[in-house]
Amino acid sequence: MGIELLVNMAYVVAAVLFIFGLKMLGSPATARKGNLVSALGMFIAVIVTLLDQSIIDFKWILAGVVVGGAIGALVARRVEMTGMPEMVALFNGFGGVASLFVGWAALYDMHDAHTFVLITIVLSILIGGVTFSGSMVAWGKLSERISGKAIVFGGQRVFNILLIIAIIVSAVMFTLSTGPATSIYLYLVIGLSLLLGIMLVIPIGGADMPVVISLLNSYSGLAACAAGIAINNIILIVAGALVGASGIILTQIMCKAMNRSLSNVLFSGFSAVSASGTAAKIEGEAKAMTAEDAYYVLEAAASVVIVPGYGMAVAQAQHVVKELQELLEKNGAEVVYAIHPVAGRMPGHMNVLLAEADVSYDLLLEMDAVNPRMETFDVAIVIGANDVVNPAAREMEGSPIYGMPVINVDMARNVFVMKRSMASGFAGIDNPLFFKENTRMLFGDAKEMLGNIIKAFS
Amino acid sequence: MENAVFLAFILMLSIFLGFELINKVPATLHTPLMSGSNAISGITLVGALTSAGAEHSTLATILGTVAVAMATINVIGGYMVTDRMLAMFKKKGGAK
């Protein structure tokens, strides 16, 4: 009793540290310390668990910790900031599979099979499995190992419904059966939940990836939570629930930023949406300009807003962007960044890239802070963003993205759009912005283009 | 049965607390928040440790060991990368 009480008290301390850590993550000034506080909580939880008397075989634990720790540390050090979404997806998957195994192992640790315990075991296996395979597909899509496009096939919905029914049936049979039949249903649940994870993520296209990542993040927390109930461990429940809640909130923010409901993102894919609206043809001609011309305009500009998108990440252009910012500032211009909530492939992706390039975070403005004063900017530079600056969302009823909040760059006096070609964005929608009177296109690699403008400055 | 009610209570309170905490995080910090909370979800490690360590059947030990390795990647990698990211978030004090 004594040691068990001690362990549980330590878990309470760990929970408090997690909570304070998350609270401190709420401000850039304290965030780093907050992360350390939460790591300390984790450290305490792990250490007291090791001290717990029920744990005898340190050999296995050590092996797992050494291997896992080495891989984790290596990946964390090596990963490029542009590759952050893939890495988060991958780590989510590992968390999911760990929960699956914990639930599975708990099955062999039961002395008396309560139905309640069995339900929680099957839940942790189910959520863990979905998290794992879903995250792997997301990782494949983000790292372009598999096509980033939405994969939709006929009868997909029917197939998914049948799949879910099959899972429910085998889960129920698992909790009710006894003896060797249990294992058969167990493997069925594992297999089907892995399949479900794949089915849930393949119909989701590139631009919707931020939503998926957030959702999988939430699942990984819920999986830990279910595993915690299965093995009767309070710290798993608390920490898992905190993560689950945070993932759900991020998911909500992302959906709102795209003016779509969660079910719409999850089940339809963009193709189904765009079928409904054959929008009016966009008339006009896109006007191209050279880096030199861009320089003349920028040199005379007093205020510039930069709108980055996924293209900036692809071109690794964040450092040149920062260089341009410094030149413009030296020239007496005000420079700010306008960041759309779903720019990039995960929530806050652009902010991290710009922070890597040493851009002060108080210059990174949210969409709602920039839009009201858009008319006052002399130049808006769009770097590798497309759908998040598409005025069709405002003015073209019937456009698939109509109603989505966008950054109104077309209201600035001049708009420069850096783009590799005239191809449409991930959503596959034409962008009337390119044909506006005040828009000039700078075709080419964003990094090269910015480099040319910078050369013109010196 | 009493235990189930108790666990459900804890679960519910934690979810509400999570909502309150995360709602206040600004968009700038969403990526670190995600990788940081991702690291917390590696708390499964604690569960894995009990499975790998206790003298259960061989299968439970194997599952537990793999779970320990996976969860450790999640925890160590998650915290380190979050720290790396947050170290880059700087405000230029009085530059302008």
Image (cartoon, coloured by chain):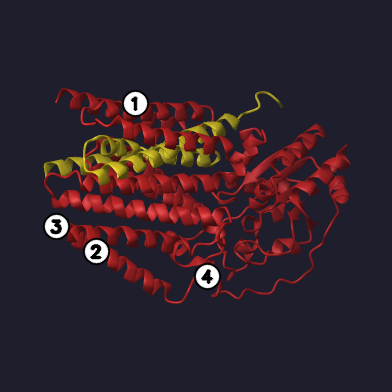
Chain colours: A red, B yellow
Amino acid carrying label 2: it is Ser
Instruction: Report which residue position mark 1 lands on.
Output: A44
Instruction: Report which residue position mark 4 lands on.
Output: A273
Instruction: Report which residue position mark 2 lands on.
Output: A170
The tag on residue A179 is 3
Q: Earlier in the sequence, mark 4 or mark 2?
A: 2
- Cα gap from disc 2 to disc 1, whole angstroms: 38 Å
Contact? badges 2 and 3 (CB < 8 Å): no
- Cα gap from disc 1 to disc 3, whole angstroms: 39 Å
Query: Which chain letter matches label 1?
Result: A
Badge 4: few (under 14), some or many (20 or more) residues near its Cα, within 10 Å? some
Q: Which one is in front in this view, the residue at disc 1 or the one at disc 3?
A: 3
Q: Position of residue A188 (x, y in %)?
A: 28, 62
| Picture layout, residue A125 above or below residue A69 | below
Q: Which one is in front in this view, the residue at disc 2 or the one at disc 3?
A: 3
Nearer to us in this view, A328 or A300: A328
Nearer to us in this view, B3 or A148: A148
Q: Position of residue A403 (x, y in %)?
A: 55, 62
Same chain for the residues under marks 1 and 3 in the image = yes
Badge 2: few (under 14), some or many (20 or more) residues near its Cα, within 10 Å? many
Q: Position of residue A201 (x, y in %)?
A: 46, 60
Contact? badges 1 and 3 (CB < 8 Å): no
